[in-house]
């Protein structure tokens, strides 16, 4: 069997000749692309300087400079392709891009959504680079607002990457949006303590602490009547409103109040519980015919346990023939309880 390889060899020669002819176009296309890369760098620097001169935030300058740079590079790629492949005209190239635009849009929907959200965040400026924000379960300092996501540095030195669309569509608390911030701590005093005196003592204690603003002045409000204490809410303001200042100031306030209240005779009560039995009929319980402690009212006021015990002992003594005069020791052993009303 004889194989005819001349046609194959002719095909290979034509391909090599076409490649050799295309080498100048490839070199020129690479040169054009390098030129566009340099132009992209210059455009990026120009946009950054323009944003700084107009007083725009650093995040806006950074993102828009990146967008301009990518646009220039994209145009450079298209021009380089038309140089390398002369038969590829701009009309056919944009036509191909238009046909595949729908598929690209669906494939990169999340990227485009985050890109638009990042631009809107930079334009509306709900927060800026350097602000301390809370988003969901994450809290930290905004390090960078990129095209796709925002970089958040937590207080325990971790990096959290949050998509821009999530930040733009969900609730975000900006702790450093205003120059001052109000904090509050809760302190409990006993029910027998004087609330007005405790309030005055706390305010006098806060007056001499560093880091607290006196305008607006601190305040003390009765928050609730708790299970075992009267809870007071101590409010005060700090400046600057950063996390470090908030934690340190709360520590200082709590320590000062803890030392001042007991020294002045105020009680800082512990949690207590009272267990009541349904058959408890002590003398100090009062009138059992009235509903009390959630117990049902009784038609009669039963005697206390001490009275019932003395009556039982008296009955036993009577049965044994022992009178009160014969057993004075028994009366001394059983002290008389105050009679119920």
Image (cartoon, helix red, strand yellow):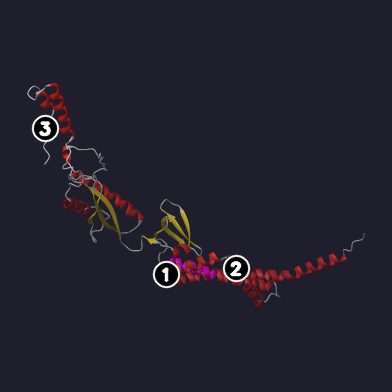
- Circle nearer the N terminus (2, 1): 2
* Total numbered badges shown on the rendered structure: 3
Q: Which residue is mark 3?
A: 336
Q: Nearer the viewer, residue 7 or 341?
A: 341
> What is the x, y in percent for residue 150?
47, 61
- Circle nearer the N terminus (1, 3): 1
Q: Residue at x 90, y 61 (%)?
A: 3
Q: Residue at x 80, y 69 (%)?
A: 14
Q: Which mark is residue 104?
A: 2
Identify the residue at the far left of this view: 325
Q: Quadrant of residue 10?
A: bottom right
Determine crowd level at label 2: few under 14, some 14-19, many 20+ residues with C-alpha closer than 10 A: few
> What is the x, y in percent for residue 280?
22, 38
Identify the residue at the far front of this view: 319
Q: Residue at x 46, y 72 (%)?
A: 50
Q: CA distance from mark 3 to mark 2?
A: 96 Å
Q: Which-is-in-front pick, marks 2 and 1?
A: 2
> What is the x, y in percent for residue 121?
44, 67
Q: Is label 2 in contact with label 1 (beta carbons under 8 Å)?
A: no
């Amino acid at each position: 069997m004889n194989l005819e390889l001349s046609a194959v060899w002719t095909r290979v020669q034509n391909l090599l000749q076409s490649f050799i002819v295309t080498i100048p176009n490839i070199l020129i296309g690479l040169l054009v692309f390098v030129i566009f890369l340099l132009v992209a760098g210059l455009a990026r620097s120009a946009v950054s300087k323009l944003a700084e001169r107009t007083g725009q935030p650093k995040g806006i300058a950074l993102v828009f400079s990146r967008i301009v740079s990518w646009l220039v590079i994209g145009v450079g790629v298209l021009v380089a392709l038309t140089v390398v492949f002369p038969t590829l005209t701009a009309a056919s190239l944009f036509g191909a891009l238009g046909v595949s635009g729908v598929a690209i849009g669906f494939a990169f929907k999340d990227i485009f959504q985050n890109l638009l959200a990042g631009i809107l965040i930079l334009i509306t400026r709900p927060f800026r680079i350097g602000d301390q924000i809370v988003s969901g379960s994450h809290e930290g300092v905004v390090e960078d607002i990129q095209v796709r996501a925002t970089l958040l540095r937590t207080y325990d030195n971790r990096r959290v990457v949050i998509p821009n669309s999530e930040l733009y569509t969900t609730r975000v608390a900006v702790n450093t949006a205003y120059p001052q911030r109000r904090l509050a701590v809760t302190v409990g005093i006993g029910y027998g303590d004087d609330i007005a005196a405790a309030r005055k003592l706390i305010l006098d204690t806060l007056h001499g602490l560093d880091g607290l603003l006196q305008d607006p002045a601190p305040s003390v409000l009765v928050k609730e009547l708790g299970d075992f204490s009267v809870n007071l809410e101590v409010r005060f303001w700090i400046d600057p409103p950063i996390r470090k200042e908030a934690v340190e100031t709360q520590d200082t306030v709590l320590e000062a109040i803890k030392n001042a209240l007991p020294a002045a005779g105020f009680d800082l009560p512990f949690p207590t519980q009272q267990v009541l039995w349904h058959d408890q009929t002590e003398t100090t319980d009062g009138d059992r015919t009235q509903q009390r402690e959630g117990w049902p009212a009784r038609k009669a006021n039963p005697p206390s346990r001490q009275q019932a015990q003395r009556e039982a002992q008296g009955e036993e003594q009577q049965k044994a023939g022992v009178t009160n005069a014969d057993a004075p020791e028994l009366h001394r052993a059983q002290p008389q309880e105050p009679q119920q009303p």
